[in-house]
Structure formats: structure tokens, C-alpha cells
Amino acid sequence: MKFIYQTWWKILAVLLVLSTFYTGLLFKAPRLPIIHETIRNLYFHVPMWMGMLTVFVVSVYFSIKYLRNGKEEDDLASVECVNTGLLFYSLGLLTGMLWAKYTWGEFWSGDPKQNSAAIAFLLYCAYLVLRNSIDEEQKRAKISAIYNIFAFPVMIVLIFVLPRMTDSLHPGSGGNPAFGKYDLDNGMKVAFYPAMLAWSFMAIWIASVRYRIRLIEYKKNEI
Amino acid sequence: MKKFTVLLLLILSFATVFAQQSQPVEMADVLRSSGKIYVVVVTIVIIFAGLAFYLFSIDKRLKKIEKEK
């Protein structure tokens, strides 16, 4: 846990995000019909989901750790990771909706990708509701850890597997090419990979700050 | 004669409608101008606003703890 108290990776994350404002907005991007310049959203919309995924994975890790050793701190870490993940989830949904409005025509067109993303969002909201509805501390931690471990694969299937098996407007689904096709010959990787890495670290940073506050709250209540 | 003028009128009105259609559709939509780059700008604004909002909520929580001390 020493990692979250170090500074170097936070500086790295900030510098990488700053670099994407230059590389992402000014570097050459493929000229495509309908999408036009909004292809640059790839460096801002997609990393939100990467950030979400990162903290959710960390959250599952701490849930498993809690079930193994029963330390209250691990439970707190997993909750704060989910809280942060939901922030990135909302940002991903909102930026996606805006992008959809100007490429697909509607903010919400009932696309399989959008619908299953909404369902998975509710799945994680249910996690927080479940947590808050149990008063007894150990029971709450145990039940929510188990719920979290099961919610994660369901979320993965809903967002990343099912929409790809049907017709969807979203790139990478139903015969639509993903943007990875354009990465290779246009140097979009220069902006895309740093953005993914940077926002993962940003998500972990926010989660770690929340965890540290939560830890103080917890220790105070214990006394 | 009357029928003929009506027919001519209808044909001509069709011609005008057709002429109108060939003109480019002008949309008063700022976000669609300049190759839709403003969609990207608004995306960045949404992300920043979300982070700022979250920062405020964390700040509020920390203040609460500081007050209790």
C-alpha cells in the first residue's frame, strides 16, 4: 500500500494527460465521413472507460483480499474504488451520449452498447444501495465483497461482450470496425496509449485519496 | 385553357420546390461547424466539470473530518 503515498506516478499521470491535449488535438487524425474531427474523442471518451475498468479491477482485488483475511481496510478500499469507478462510468456515459448525438443523431438511441452500459451502471448502483442497507459492519463488508466479485464479470459481459455480438452503432460491434484499424497507419497510438495509461492512474489517484479520507473516518469511529 | 394553366402552374411550382431542395441545408448548429471539433471540446469540458465536481465533494468530506477534530 506504500504505492498510493508516493508522488512520482501522480506527476507522470498529470504530464501524460497534458501531453494528450497536444497530441490528441493537433496531431493528424484520419479523415472519415460523419465522424470528422470527433474521432479525437477517442483520446478522451475511451480512457474514461479504461479508468473505470482499472479501479473496478482494483476493487475486485480488494474484495477478494477482504474475504481472505477479513481486514476492514480492504473493504474500505474496495468501496472507494467502486465510488471512483462510478464517477468515470458517468463521465464515460455522458461523453458517449454527446458523441452519439453528433454522429448517430440522438443522445440515446437505444443502441445495445448504450442500453447494456446503463444496465451495468444500475448493477453497480445496486452495490452501493446494498451496502448502505446493512448496518452490521462485518456482514456488510462480506456481502458487498461477494456482490462486487460477481458484479464485475457481469459488467464485463454486458459492456464488452454482448453488444459486440449484435448489431450496434458503436465501433467494434456488429461488423463496425473499431478505431484500432486506423491507429496503425495514422500514428494515433501516440495520443491514445498515453491517454489510456494516464486516466488509469488518475482514477487510482482519486480512489486512493478517497480511501485515505475513509481510513481516517474509520479509525476515528473505532476509538 | 384553365386546365392548361393549372397544369403549367403545378409543373412550375414543382420546379421551384426542386430548386430549393438542391441548395445546401444550412443548420444553425455551432457544434457541427469546423468539422465537429466543438464536440471534442465539450467532451473535455464535461470531463473537467465532472472531476471538479468530484473534487468539491471530496473537499466537503475532508472539511467535515477537520471540523470534528
Image: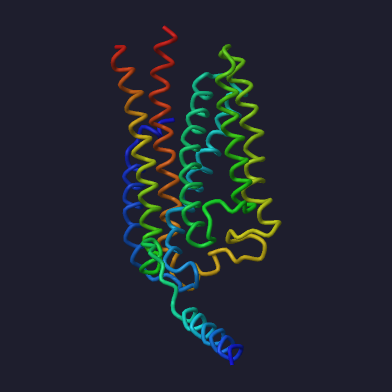
The residue lying toward the viewer, choosing from A148 and A165, is: A165
Looking at the picture, does residue A77 appear above or below residue A58?
A: above
**What sort of colour scheme is used for the picture?**
rainbow
Residue at x-position 52% and y-position 33%: A82
Q: Quadrant of residue A153?
A: top right
- Percent position of residue A184, x then y: 50, 70
Looking at the picture, does residue A181 appear above or below residue A220?
A: below
- Percent position of residue A155, x then y: 63, 41
The residue lying toward the viewer, choosing from A35 and B23, is: B23
Task: Describe residue A130's horizontal placement relative to residue A52 as left or right.
Answer: right
Looking at the picture, does residue B18 appear above or below residue A95?
A: below
- Percent position of residue A139, x then y: 62, 15
Residue that extends furthest to the right in the rendered view of this protein: A165
- Percent position of residue B20, x then y: 46, 79
Residue at x-position 39% and y-position 69%: B35
Q: Quadrant of the N terminus of chain A?
A: top left
Q: How many marks?
A: 0
Task: Describe residue A42's horizontal placement relative to residue A153 as left or right.
Answer: left
The residue lying toward the viewer, choosing from A142 and B47, is: B47
Residue at x-position 45% and y-position 57%: A193
Looking at the picture, does residue B6 appear above or below residue A46?
A: below
Q: Quadrant of the C terminus of chain A?
A: top left
The residue lying toward the viewer, choosing from A197 and A154, is: A154
Residue at x-position 31% and y-position 51%: A15
